[in-house]
């Protein structure tokens, strides 16, 4: 053990040398090597994608159904399922792309943020793949990738643009001036929008993940049936925990008067709860657009799949003269295609990662 530890420590001393050697080896060649294999395993989707010259060829996603039994992601089950699935998902992504394994010129993986045990699966697989084939490695920031999903299909946003990133773990307004240059100008101070959907659904006894369940029921409900207060947070920042509590109290109080209240009013509750989340998100985005004068607006993250949010932003775009960009459905929730496109922009700048780099669980302000 001691010898292994010492060897590792010695190796670590050479990290800068490895990084420089890696850079020199691939410097200048990267523009001719744009077949990227990308892997994603940050939460409960195992996904692999192959990209050639900026175009996505495949995007294979394996969902983990086991978590629905528990009403949320169980980290240990998630990492075990990633381990079981990663080889098969990767193999299918390569086979379906028609690309030969030896023609893959770089490997990308989600470096963070996410569940540590889950992140490690794609990270280790990608490092093994890159080292065994002697090709460069690109560690990608998961949130940057969600935003870059807007650059997969045409038409693509131009810079500067604003992005509303709404996912299970994050709610942010980001100001982008280039593919790798961005600043978070708004953030949630507590729960994320997706979390509000998931927790709201749990309160109403709807299945996990809650977003799609609420979205579906909201279609047949009245968004004005119930009033939920708008959280008063300054600037472009958000808060969602009070909204969830007001839903809980409303249902608790009404159930005292009528035990069938929830069953009778589920669609209206979903429509009203969704309406409040959607109007809150769009009001903040409108404020950011007015203050910055930016009318190139894009949407990202799992909650971008919400039909209420899409419709509201489309109407707002018409009224405000925005160019609105929304990624295709399959690129909104976690997927490896978004990792591949984010890696592509880093590859174009010769921005590789060293195999020595570790995963990270919490979000980072900068993605350079
Ligand atoms: P994360 O990357 O933080 O895990 P994802 O980008 O995978 O999050 O998005 C998952 C989140 O998106 C979940 O909270 C889920 O409820 C939400 N979501 C997915 N589809 C919809 C929808 N149609 N309406 C609202 N929320 C949705
Ligand atoms: Mg995600």
Image (spheres, rainbow, N blue to C red):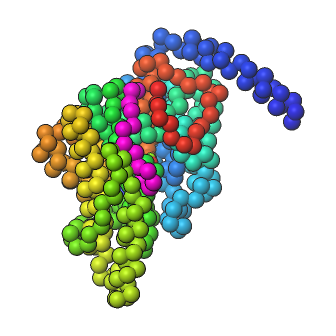
Q: What percent of the width, then of the height, locates residue 269?
A: 30, 72
In the rendered image, which quarter contains the N terminus? top right
| Residue situated in front as seen by the camera: 13 or 255 | 255
* On screen, residue 207 above or below 188: below
Q: What percent of the width, then of the height, locates residue 159?
A: 27, 27
Quarter of the image where one finds residue 285: top left
Q: Tell me where the magenta segment starts and ends, as one range.
A: 180-192
Q: What percent of the width, then of the height, locates residue 305?
A: 32, 52
Q: Is residue 153 left or right of residue 2?
A: left
Q: Residue at x 53, y 14 (%)?
A: 26
Quarter of the image where one finds residue 179: top left
Q: Residue at x 57, y 11 (%)?
A: 24
Q: What percent of the width, then of the height, locates residue 65?
A: 50, 61
Q: Residue furthest right?
A: 2
| Residue 117 seen from this side | yes
| Residue situated in front as seen by the camera: 289 or 51 | 289
Count of numbered badges drawn on the protein? 0
Membership of 181 in magenta stretch: yes
| Residue situated in front as seen by the camera: 296 or 291 | 291
Membership of 291 in magenta stretch: no
* On screen, residue 352 above or below 298: above
| Residue 89 seen from this side | no
* On screen, residue 152 above or below 165: above
């Amino acid at each position: 053990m001691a010898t292994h530890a010492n060897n590792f420590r010695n190796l670590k001393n050479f990290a800068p040398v490895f990084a420089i050697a890696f850079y020199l080896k691939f410097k200048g060649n990267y523009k001719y090597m744009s077949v990227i294999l990308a892997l994603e395993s940050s939460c409960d989707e195992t996904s692999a994608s192959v990209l050639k010259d900026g175009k996505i060829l495949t995007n294979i996603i394996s969902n983990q159904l086991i978590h629905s039994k528990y009403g949320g992601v169980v980290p240990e089950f998630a990492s075990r399922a990633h381990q079981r699935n990663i080889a098969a998902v990767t193999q299918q992504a390569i086979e379906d792309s028609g690309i030969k394994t030896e023609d893959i010129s770089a490997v990308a993986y989600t470096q963070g943020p996410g569940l540590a045990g889950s992140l490690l699966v794609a990270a280790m697989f990608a490092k093994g793949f890159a080292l065994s084939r002697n090709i460069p490695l690109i560690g990608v920031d998961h949130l940057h990738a969600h935003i870059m999903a807007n650059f997969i299909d045409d038409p693509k946003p131009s810079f500067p643009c604003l992005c509303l990133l709404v996912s299970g773990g994050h709610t942010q307004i980001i100001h982008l001036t280039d593919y790798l240059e961005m600043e978070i100008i708004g953030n949630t101070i507590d729960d994320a929008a997706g979390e509000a959907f998931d927790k709201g659904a749990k309160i109403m006894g709807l299945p996990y993940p809650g977003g799609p369940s609420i979205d579906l029921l909201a279609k047949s409900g009245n968004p004005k049936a119930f009033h939920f207060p708008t959280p008063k947070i300054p600037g472009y920042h958000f808060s969602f925990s009070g909204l969830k509590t007001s839903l809980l109290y409303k249902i608790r109080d009404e159930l005292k008067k009528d035990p069938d209240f929830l069953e009778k009013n589920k669609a209206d509750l979903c429509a009203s709860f969704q309406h409040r989340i959607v109007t809150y998100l769009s009001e903040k985005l409108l404020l950011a657009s007015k203050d910055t004068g930016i009318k190139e607006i894009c949407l990202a993250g799992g909650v971008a799949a919400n039909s209420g949010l899409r419709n509201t932003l489309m109407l707002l775009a018409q009224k405000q003269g925005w160019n609105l960009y929304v990624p295709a459905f399959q690129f909104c929730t976690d997927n490896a295609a978004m990792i591949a496109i984010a890696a592509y922009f880093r590859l174009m700048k010769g921005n590789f990662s060293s195999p020595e780099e570790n995963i990270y669980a919490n979000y980072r302000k900068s993605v350079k």
